Amino acid sequence: MSAERVLVDTSVWVAYFRGGSPAISEKVDRLLAGEGICVPKIVLAELVQGAKSEREISTIEDFFDAFTILDQSPETWLKAGKLSRELKIRGKTIHLLDCYIAVIAKENACAVLTLDDHFKEIQRVLPLALI
């Protein structure tokens, strides 16, 4: 894989850590071999929220020390709110956190690796590279 920056979404990390899909494991392993994985703080929070034990939390904290943690601009949440509103006007209700993830990926020139189909709806409003 090239030096492309990739934001790996929560859905992919869950599948990866729980062994849900050999194809996803292979993609993530390829990304891990490079240095292009980016993670917004909200993805870390979502993973910790879903952790089943203190040990899982510790693993998450240690594992993610190796990645670029994305910073937000002062307008990131405002842009996410506007994106969510625009989608709602178009008849699509997408969770605000996913709109935030899309916006921060765009701000940081990252492609998004996700298993969530609603990112395709987001892509209709916000040009976003999905893999």
Image (cartoon, rainbow, N blue to C red):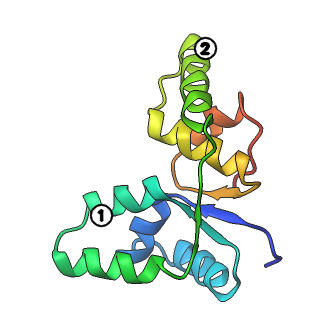
Residue drawn at point x = 41 percent, y = 62 percent: 44
- In the displayed structure image, the side of residue 90 where residue 48 appears, left or right: left
Res. 90 mark: 2
Residue 86 visible to the viewer: yes
How many neighbours does mark 1 have within 10 angstroms: few (below 14), some (14-19), or many (20 or more)?
some
The quarter of the picture where the N terminus appears is bottom right
Q: Position of residue 109 (x, y in %)?
A: 77, 54
Judged by depth in the image, the label closer to the viewer, 1 or 2, is 1
How many neighbours does mark 2 have within 10 angstroms: few (below 14), some (14-19), or many (20 or more)?
few
Q: Are marks 1 and 2 in contact (CB under 8 Å)?
A: no
Res. 48 mark: 1
Q: Position of residue 66 (x, y in %)?
A: 54, 82
Q: Quadrant of residue 26?
A: bottom right
Residue drawn at point x = 45 percent, y = 74 percent: 16
Tally of marks:
2
Q: Position of residue 20 (x, y in %)?
A: 40, 71
Helix, strand or loop for disc 1: helix
- In the displayed structure image, the side of residue 47 where residue 82 appears, left or right: right
Residue 19 visible to the viewer: no
Q: Amino acid at mark 1?
A: Val
- In the displayed structure image, the side of residue 94 where residue 51 appears, left or right: left
Res. 115 mark: none
Query: For the residues marked 1 and 2, what is the alpha-carbon distance in whole angstroms?
Result: 32 Å
